[in-house]
Amino acid sequence: MSRTTHLRRSRVALAVTLAAASLLISACGGSTGSKDPAVQKPVKPGQKVDLRFWSWVPGVDKAVDKWNATHPDIRVKLEKIPAGSSGGYAKMRAALKSGNAPDLAQVEYQEIPSFLLENGLVNLSQYGADKDRSKFVDWQWQQGVFDKAVYAIPQASGPMGLFYRSDLFKKWGITPPATWDEFAQAAQKIHDADPKAYISTFPAGNSAWFTALAWQAGAKWFGVNGDTWSVNIDSPQTLKVAAFWDDLRSKKVIKTEPDFANGWYKDLQTGGITSWVSAQWGDAIISGNAPRTTGKWAVAPMPQWTKGSNVSANWGGSSTAVLKGAKHIPEALKFAEWLNTDPTSVDLLLQGGYGWPAAADGYKGSSLDKPSQFFGGQKYNEVFAEADKNIDNSWKWIPTIDATYQHLNDGFQAALAGKGTFVSAVKQAQKQTVEDLKKKGLKVSTGQ
Amino acid sequence: MPTRAPRRRRNLAPVVFVAPFLLLFLLTFALPIGYAVYQSVMDVEYTGSLGLGGSHTVFVALSNYSDALSDHAFLRSIGRVLLFAVVQVPVMVVLSAGLALLLDSASAKGVRFFRAAFFLPYGVPGVIASILWGFLYVPGVSPLVDGMRHLGLSVDLLGGNTVLWSIANIVTWEFAGYNVLVLVAQLRTIPAELYEAARIDGASAWATVRHVKLPLLRPALILTTVFTIIGTLQLFAEPLVLKPVSSSIDSAYTPNLSAYNEAFTNDNYHLAAAEAVLLALAAFVLSFGFLRLINKRGGDA
C-alpha cells in the first residue's frame, strides 16, 4: 500500500475523527437544563482571582495588560482565538459542552441568540449588570438583552458610510451619490469613464454586508413574538435591495468579485474599485491595504433610498460575554464593564481598530475625533458619529444566523453563476431559515 | 519428518503480534466510525420559550440521512465530485502512466532529475498548493491571467463553469508525480529477460510497451486508479482554500465541504455525521465496485 492511500485515508480519518471528536464533546454535555446554579458572591477583598478571556480583537492584549497592571487582585489571562466565524465559535461551543469554557469570551451581536440557545451565557442581571446600562449606546445594550435579562456587555459596532476615491470622483466629475439612484448613475458613469474601473463589487460570499444594506432599507428580518421566533427576510424592503443589485449586475457596471480577497485588495490599491459602502472599521482595511492611496479617499454618508432622508445601518458589532461555567462571575463582569467603558481601555482598543465604541461617550475626544491624513485631512469619523445616531435600533437576530448567511451566500453565488437572481436567493433564504429553526424544534412565524 | 510445534502456542502467536495493531485499529478507526454512525441517528431538541429552556439529545433513526439526501445542495455536491472523478481519474491515470513510461524508456536522459521534479509537488501540502495556484487564478494579481488577456484570451479561471477544472489542475499537479513514482517502481520490477525476449522476437518499442510493459503495470495502475477515485470523492482542501477568492464555490461545493460547514459553521453535528457516513459509503461502493469490475475481467489486482 502506498503513501497516497495513507494520505488520502488519513484525510477521511481526519474528517471522521474531527467529526467524532466534536460529537464526543457534545455527547458529554448531554442534556443541559435551564436551571442556573446559585448566584455567586464576589470574593473577599485582597483575595486573588484568575480569569480566562478568549478574544481575537486586535489591540485587546494591550487593554488586558493595562487592566492587569492596575488591578493586581483580578488577573485576566487573555487567550487569542481565531475570529468567531473562522473557528472561534466552534471552539467556544466545544469548550462549553465539555464544561471547560473560559470565564469571558468575545461574542458578536448576531451570535448572542445562538449561544443563548446552547445555554452558554450567564444572566448578568443577577449580578447587577443593569446599573451599567446608561454607560452604553442604548441599542447596542439591547443586543444582549433577552426576556429582560442582560447576557452580554456591548463592546463595539459598525455604523455605515460610503468610502470613495475623491481624486477619481473629481476627475470624472462625479459627486458622492446621496441616493441609491445616484449610486446607480455613478456606477454607469465610472465604468464609462474607465472600462477597468467600477463603483464597487457585490460580494456574493459576504451576506453580512447585504444584511446591513437591507437593515438600512428598513427591513426587520427577525423578531420575537412571545415564545416564537419570527422570520421576515423576504420583505419588500429586502427584495428592493436585491433587485437594485440585480439591476447593476445585469448592466455589468459593478464587479462581482469577493471582498477581502487578493483581487479586491488589488482593486482598492489601483482604483479598480472606487468606492465601498462599509462600516466605520473599514477605514483600517483601506488604509492598511492600500497605503499608497493616502489622501485620495474620503467618506460620505450612506446613499439613501429616499432623497433627503438620513438612515444608516450597522455592519458588525461585538460584545464581551460571561460564559456558563465561569468560576468568578462578579469579577468577570467587573472586567467586562471596565474593558468596554474605561477611557484608557477604549482608546487602546480604538488604536487596535476594533470598531465603533459601544460606550456612550467613547467617540468624543478619542483618537477617532481627529482629522485624518489618509482621508485627505477630513475629520471623517463625524460621518460615522452621525450615522450611529441614525440606525434603526430595533434590529434583532436569531439562533441560526450562520446558516441564514450561508443560504444567502450560496444563493447569491448561484445567481452569479447564472442560476437565479439575488431576489430569488432572498426568497429561498427565507424558506430555508424557517426550516432551520423548525428542525431545531423551535416555533417559527413568518412576517413581522 | 519435522516435529510439529504444539498447536496452542502456534495459534496464540499471531494474536499476540496482531493485538497492538488491533487495539489501535479499534481505538482510532472502528470507534470513531462507530461513533459517527451513532451520532448520525441522533439529534438535539430544544424546549421552553424560544427554545431557551434547555436541550436534550433524541433518537431520530434515519431522519438525518433523509434530510441529507433531500438536500439539493448536498446532492449536487455528490454529482459534482462524480463528474470530477469521471474526468479526473482517466486524466490522472493516463498522464501518470505516460510520464512513467517516458521516464522508464531506455533512451530517457536526466531520469533522476525528472523523477524528482515530478515528485516535488507531492511534498507541497495541499493547502499551500491551493494558495499558490489561487494566486495564479485571481485576475489582476495573476501573471497567467494577465498574460492570457494580452493574447486576447479572457478566461475566468474562478468562474462557475471553470473553477472545478481549475481545481482538477491543482489536484493533478499535486498527485500525478506520486502516481508516477508508484508506476516507475512497478516498471523497475519487470525482469530484463522479458525485454530481451521481446527484442529477439523483433518487437518495436511501441509493441514492447503494449504487450510487455502495460500488462505487467496492471496491478500498479489499478492501485493508482483506486487511490484517485477515493481521493477525488474526498475533495476538500482545494475548494476550501479557493472559496474566499471565487464566487463560484458555495458552502456545499463538495460533500466533505458540506459536512464540514454543517459541523463547524451551523453547529449541526448530527447532520454532518450523516453526511460523512454517506460519503464514506460512496467511496466504499465505488472503489470496491471498481476492483470487482476489474477482477471479473480476469487477472489479479
Image (cartoon, coloured by chain):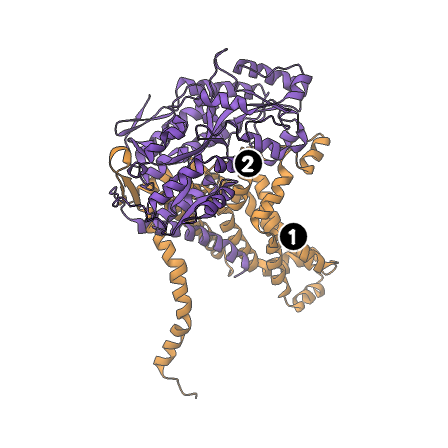
Chain colours: A purple, B orange
How far across and down, in percent of the image, does residue A91 sit?
Answer: 42, 46
Q: Kindly indicate whether the residues beneath marks 1 and 2 are on one polypeptide chain.
A: no
Residue at position x 57%, y 16% in the image? A177
Local crowd size for mark 1, using a 10 Å CA cut-off: few (<14), some (14–19), many (≥20): some
Residue A398 position (above or below residue B97): above
How far across and down, in percent of the image, does residue B63 sit?
Answer: 31, 41
Q: For the residues carrying marks 1 and 2, which lies nearer the camera in this image?
A: 2
Residue at position x 38%, y 55% in the image? B32
- Tell me the quarter of the image containing the C terminus of chain A: top left
Lateral position of residue A171 relative to residue B61, left or right? right
Which label is found at residue A351? 2
Local crowd size for mark 2, using a 10 Å CA cut-off: few (<14), some (14–19), many (≥20): some
What subunit carries mark 2?
A
Residue at position x 55%, y 36% in the image? A351
How far across and down, in percent of the image, does residue A421 sit?
Answer: 48, 23
Q: Amino acid at mark 1?
A: Gly
**Residue located beneath label 1 in the image:** B98
User: Which type of secondary structure does the marked residue at label 1 adopt?
Assistant: helix
Which label is found at residue B11? none
Task: Judge by depth and name the residue closer to the eye, B178 or A150.
Answer: A150
User: Which type of secondary structure does the marked residue at label 2 adopt?
Assistant: helix
Mark 1 to mark 2: distance in Å? 59 Å
